[in-house]
Image (cartoon, rainbow, N blue to C red):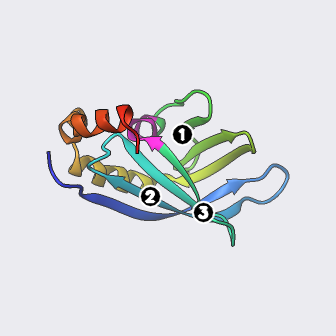
Amino acid sequence: MSSSTTVSAELGLRLVVPGRPAVPLLAGLDYASDDPYAIRMTFYVGNDDPVEWIFARELLTVGIVRPVGDGDVRVGPGTDRILHISLSSPFGTALFEVPLAPLADFLHQTYRLVSAGHESEFVDIDVELENLLWPS
């Protein structure tokens, strides 16, 4: 195990609004080696509190080359080096266009930190079990 090391980035993306021009937004991406399967994406939506979604790192990686995901999160390649991320919640559905190059750069940094297939080496199973069995 190692202590947590993180990778962060800011990413400009667009919210697709049917029948209207796309709305530019800013999102923060965060990855930590002590949670090696997850990427946190924080959407900054005007003056409201930011909205955070947690994605499987593999979902974003596979979504670059082919459509993937079921249920609330779907990811797939778009046109012109764009990745589509579709999110559904009880409050509605949102489709985002994410520029591929900066997202791919971020993902490469996460894989330099924790290689694919080595994620389990960075998870403290005892702590995870304790959190599941004896929540605070």
Image spot of residue 13 (x, y percent): 58, 59
Q: Where does label 3 land, which residue?
A: 50
Secondary element at image label 1: strand
Of the 4 image quadrants, the one containing the N terminus is top left
The residue range painted magenta reads 55-62
The relative height of residue 102 versus residue 1 in the rendered view (above or below) is below
Secondary element at image label 3: loop
Task: Return the disc, 2 or 3, that comes first in the chain's sequence.
Answer: 2
113 magenta-colored: no
Distance of label 2 from label 1 (alpha carbons): 19 Å
Q: Which mark is residue 77?
A: 1
Q: Which mark is residue 29?
A: 2
Of the 4 image quadrants, the one containing the C terminus is top left
**Dot 3, crowdedness within 10 Å: few (<14), some or many (≥20)?**
few
Residue at point 40% right, 57% down? 30
Q: Amino acid at mark 3?
A: Pro
On the rendered structure, is 52 left or right of 46? Answer: left
State the residue in front, 37 or 75. Answer: 37
Task: Please identify the quarter of the rendering in which residue 106 is found.
Answer: bottom left
Q: Amino acid at mark 1?
A: Pro
